[in-house]
Amino acid sequence: MAKKVYVTRPVPEIGPKMLLEAGLEVDGSSEDRVLSREEIVENIKGCDAVFCLLTDRFDAEVMDAAPGLEIIGNMAVGYDNIDTAAATERAIVVTNTPGVLTDATADLAWALLMSITRRTVEGDRWMRAGTWSGWGPMQLLGGDMAGKTIGIVGAGRIGCAVARRSAGWKMKVLYNNPSPRPKLEEALGASKVDLESLLRDSDFVSIHTPLKPETEHLIGEKELSLMKPSAYLINTSRGPVVDEAALVEALKEKRIAGAGLDVYEEEPKVHPGLIELDNVVLLPHLGSASIGTRSRMSQMVAENILAAFAGQVPPNCVNPEVLDKRKAL
């Protein structure tokens, strides 16, 4: 009997097509929305693999709905939506899709940085509303970028890619990361500093740290108070890394100049205070949303699933300790 894969949401066709061509039974939701917990529990019964997204939550109870589950293939770099400890306990392989979305997400971080700094979204609203009456020397004055200091919080693949893009503006680069990045230091003259120094000295703070218990609300009232009144905060990592309520107050009181956000604490909900403000640009989690990137992510999930079914180590296994358990089965 062919192994069965459930796809939780419509995705670029290359991944599901690969699975079908390999002789697997592929089923999935045809609705472009987040399935409820109850729907996922019902739909994965009898499945050997799940092809899921960051918006799908997999805890022990959900996994137990499919006792034969061998692999959860997550179409994302982050996998905080999956209880990996529970998966390992049940001998379920968990995989992600790292590396492929580095450039797309770094590009988007810069799109946010430039949009909020030069107030392009506000300008677009003026034009569409028909309220622009002609050029004026004091209209929508924004910040400067060339020669400024950018602070990278979390210098992984994406953080380093964002830093490298600053060379075109001849920026000074500061970074905060558990381990040093000698290549970044050599290429850009970047300096590794503690978080407080980074926040105090940066004109732009771009967040790229993963979501862990110790990074939840990493940027809160205290941290925002350290930033310059002329500084901008950019977040393309995970929403809960920033305390949105504290950010709203900082923006309202002009304690920082502005913010650009692609992620939120309670997606798809956005703090209502953010909606009301002009000094923040809000995007609907577009970090990896390029045609090439999302297609490659879909392909990587399929590759991971096929490798697991072939008894191989999946290219992007995030809980490798589970492999010994699977061998013992």
Image: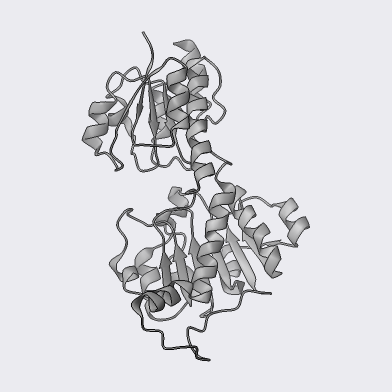
Q: Residue at x 57, y 55 (%)?
A: 106
Q: Is residue 222 left or right of residue 57?
A: right
Where residue 40 appears, as percent x and y from the top left, is 27, 32
Asked whether the viewer can see residue 318, the reply is: no
Q: Point out residue 96 in the picture as x, y percentages from the top left corner.
A: 49, 35
Question: Quarter of the image containing the C terminus?
Answer: top left
The residue sitting at 42% across, 53% down in the picture is 285
Q: Nearer the viewer, residue 13 or 36?
A: 13
- On-image quarter of the N terminus: top left
At horizontal 32% and vertical 54% (from top left) the residue drawn is 266
Picture colour scheme: one colour
Residue 234 percent location from the top left of the image: 50, 64
Instruction: Classify 191 as above or below 307.
Output: below
Can you say whether 264 is above or below 28 in the image?
below
Q: Is residue 19 left or right of residue 274?
A: right
Residue 201 visible in the snapshot: yes
Q: Where residue 218 sits: x, y (%)?
A: 46, 59
From what the image shows, is residue 116 above or below residue 240?
below
Q: Is residue 191 above or below residue 146?
A: above
Asked which quadrant contains residue 196, the reply is: bottom right
Which corner quadrant of the image does residue 187 belong to?
bottom right
Extreme-top residue of the structure: 1
Q: Residue furthest right?
A: 186
The count of marks equals: 0
